[in-house]
Image: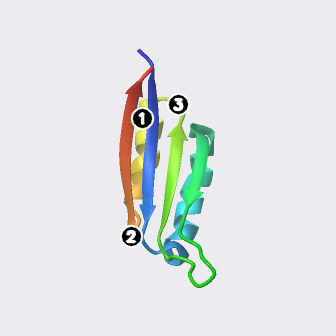
Amino acid sequence: MSKRIILGVSISQRTESVPQVQSILTECGCHIKTRLGLHEVTDNLCSPAGLLILEMHGDDAAIAHCESKLNAIDGVQVKRMEFDV
């Protein structure tokens, strides 16, 4: 049975963590099918926190490697969702 794996990546301090996060996303780029970045922006605010939604592709070991590397960054928390397809 095939699985659809989604990683939710919460980044508490975007300006501090983004260089490391971006490096890992580049390294894992061949395993990221879809990437959506969200953060709060208004006329008076650009939130320091952000959320990435990653739809992953590939074998479980490669995806787990990406998940582990992201979780190792201070201020970054990863949650995994799996759906049978």
Q: Name the residue under label 3.
A: 58
Rendered image quadrant of residue 60: top left
For image coordinates 42% across by 35% down, the residue present is 61
Query: SS class of the residue under badge 2?
Result: loop
For badge 2, the amino acid type reads Gly
Task: Report crowding for label 3: few under 14, some 14 to 19, many 20 or more residues within 10 A (C-alpha).
Answer: few
Compared to 4, does 66 lie above or below?
Answer: below
Alpha carbon separation for disc pair 1 and 3? 8 Å
Residue 14 image offset from top left, x and y in percent: 51, 72
Q: Quadrant of residue 70?
A: bottom left
Which residue in the structure is indicated by mark 2?
75
Instruction: Kindly identify the residue that appears in the image at 43 percent across and 50 percent down.
Output: 8
Q: What residue lies at 59% left-to-right and 85% top-to-bottom?
A: 44
User: Quick check: 34 left or right of 17?
Assistant: right
Tag nearer the camera, 2 or 3: 2
Badge 2 vs badge 1, beta-carbon distance below 8 Å? no
Q: Name the residue under label 1.
A: 61
Q: How many marks?
A: 3
Q: Position of residue 19 (x, y in %)?
A: 57, 69
Can you name the residue that lies furthest to the front here? Answer: 43
Q: How crowded is mark 1: few (under 14 residues within 10 Å), some or many (20 or more)?
A: few
Amino acid type of disc 1? Answer: Ala
Image spot of residue 43 (x, y percent): 63, 81
